[in-house]
Amino acid sequence: MNSNMVAMGVSELTKIVKELLLAAEVPTDEAAIITDSMIEADLRGISSHGVMRLPIYLKRLKAGSVKSKSETETIVETNNILLLDGKHSMGQVLGVQAMKKAIEKAEKNDVGIVGVKNSHHFGIAAYFSSIALQHDMIGITISNTTPLMPAIGGAEAVVGNNPFSFAIPAMDQKPIIFDMACSVVAMGKIINAQNKGESIPENWGVNHKGLPTSSPEEILSGGFISAVGGPKGFGLALVVDILCGVLLGGAYGKDVKSIYKEISEPNACGHLFIAIKINSFMLVDFFKRTVDQYITQIKSSQKAEGVSEIYLPGELELFKKERLLKEGIMLPKKVYEELLQLFEEYRTTI
Amino acid sequence: MNSNMVAMGVSELTKIVKELLLAAEVPTDEAAIITDSMIEADLRGISSHGVMRLPIYLKRLKAGSVKSKSETETIVETNNILLLDGKHSMGQVLGVQAMKKAIEKAEKNDVGIVGVKNSHHFGIAAYFSSIALQHDMIGITISNTTPLMPAIGGAEAVVGNNPFSFAIPAMDQKPIIFDMACSVVAMGKIINAQNKGESIPENWGVNHKGLPTSSPEEILSGGFISAVGGPKGFGLALVVDILCGVLLGGAYGKDVKSIYKEISEPNACGHLFIAIKINSFMLVDFFKRTVDQYITQIKSSQKAEGVSEIYLPGELELFKKERLLKEGIMLPKKVYEELLQLFEEYRTTI
């Protein structure tokens, strides 16, 4: 057991997170959504989008750069499309509301596309895509983020590592839940390498001159993370920014602000949620059984030397969730202590 | 000038390609589309999908594994969705027809999604996405292909390097035309390295045991190309295969056949074409001007040391097209001679 990590039961952690959000004047139902989304990220092993984000959310709620009680305004609505102004409310709350609307539209008209501008960091994209699964739909979620990556040949961040997520239902197999960011790795991996004094592969990032580097320090002091596959990841990230920023009349590129560096400014990111009704194409059961067959074809394919099992996108995360629901969520000591301290401060003020 | 390359005027090349297709009993209007699509690929510098594909198309037309005169059957049609059985007709013809239908549906109902199953290799995905530009729409094209890449941890091809393309209109700037395959590189690059006796980066592919290799020979003799970004590219390719194969009730995974290895068998790939009407979200001019602003923001961003200009997705391809329209298309001598020989054979038979 790593001594820098502390295990915490899911119900205890849920209680602390929710109470802290309530104390920040987030309404009960909204606090429940935000809490569930963060805990779900931790359970799936995406701790970078889990409860470690709570302290910054609380700071921003206090600063007023994100609304505690969510508001939305409808900008456009048609049979298939809904465009919402999120009025700088919490992204998790807007996201659940928007994906549910996309599902409603798809239920009636085969496909629903809901855009949200003026939103705020929403955690893991897969959380929202996954809602579509219960409705026998394919869920797609994309979002822009504050710029983190330069263009190909650039030495200045111009586009976020904008996530992409697809959720596809299966019958007896686990659903396929795919969630990627458009950078080679998350900034957290570079910080980890620095902490361990390790060098990194040259394709992970560039220094302040835009040149490849194997030094985590060079990336962290004025450098940038790189797009996955160079022009491929950059192009995908750019398309996402245009769909989630430009097309919704919201912020794009540099106008999407960092939630950490600009605490008193709205984040202003945008998201697009798409639900596709499988039943409009074919019988749902036939689709799901065929997905099962494809999964089986892949899992039973020839394995590389030394590999004992092949996993599909999202499968390891769902296994991890099953395990952590029993064992508790492992938090870095620093995050654990920060949460406990925030909780103490809150308890002494009531 | 590389002596292995031969320049050929666009009109002369167009004439030869079209005549050969007509000789293979492809109807005039369909031959025009197929020819234009291949020449367009060559003009944009995507020669792997240009006229070098004609000999295999002709072989397959002769073998009857692809129809010379296209046929389609409507499987499902709603306001937003059309699902066509392409009956193993040429992919280029089906693709243009399908994207036009997607545009019609989007014109009336904001978004059009047209799927085509039982299709055949369609060339460059961007060709179809680009049709949406003239209608002030965003065009999206995806397709599955015969399996080329193993799963993560696999040593057997289970999924194609399935292409993704987006076309986004701009006002005064060139449109953004993004087109990627989900592999790190195309097989052609590995063949090139082998021809030059060069080693390749270890992330380009794996050997027959599924282990990374820097030897082109090991990949070409029983090995495989790798997905870009590992699980990211694999996940994207898998999602595309499910959308273009499973969701359309068509072939997926191993049931999509190689156009080279299985000449007498239908290719049976599937495509999905999506058109999004910008005017349903906002004024088209405002959208296009904002895209221009974003392009300017990126092109004027700080450049990496030694870089003189930053290019957007598709920009270099459009520059190349302008140049080659004047200078002619450069063909490898082998392709040039093969085309001339086919043309001679055809002329002596009439």
Image: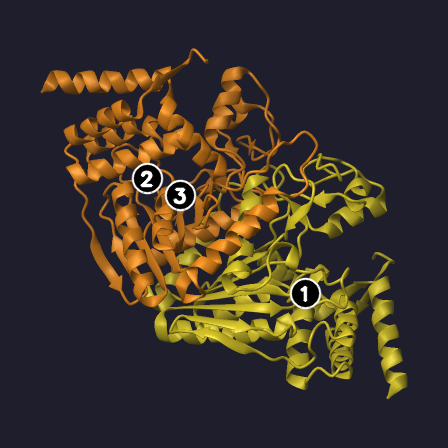
Chain colours: A yellow, B orange
Q: Do labels 3 and 1 share a chain?
A: no
Which amino acid, by three-letter code, is at mark 3?
Answer: Ala
Question: Which residue is nearer to you in this view: A76 or B204?
Answer: A76
Question: Which residue is nearer to you in this view: A202 or B11?
Answer: B11
Farthest residue to the top: give it: B3
The residue marked by circle 3 belongs to what chain? B
Q: Which of marks 3 and 1 is in front?
A: 1
The residue indicated by pointer 3 is B126
Which amino acid, by three-letter code, is at mark 1?
Answer: Asn
Q: What element carries label 3?
A: helix
Mark 3 to mark 1: distance in Å?
A: 33 Å
Q: Are marks 1 and 2 on the same chain?
A: no
The residue marked by circle 1 belongs to what chain? A
For the question of whether residue A167 can be seen, the reply is: yes
Tell me: B194 left or right of B279.
Answer: right
The residue indicated by pointer 2 is B121
Residue name at image x 63 percent, y 79 percent = A70
The residue indicated by pointer 1 is A267
Image-quadrant location for residue B77:
bottom left
Instruction: For the C terminus of chain B, give its image quadrant.
Output: top left
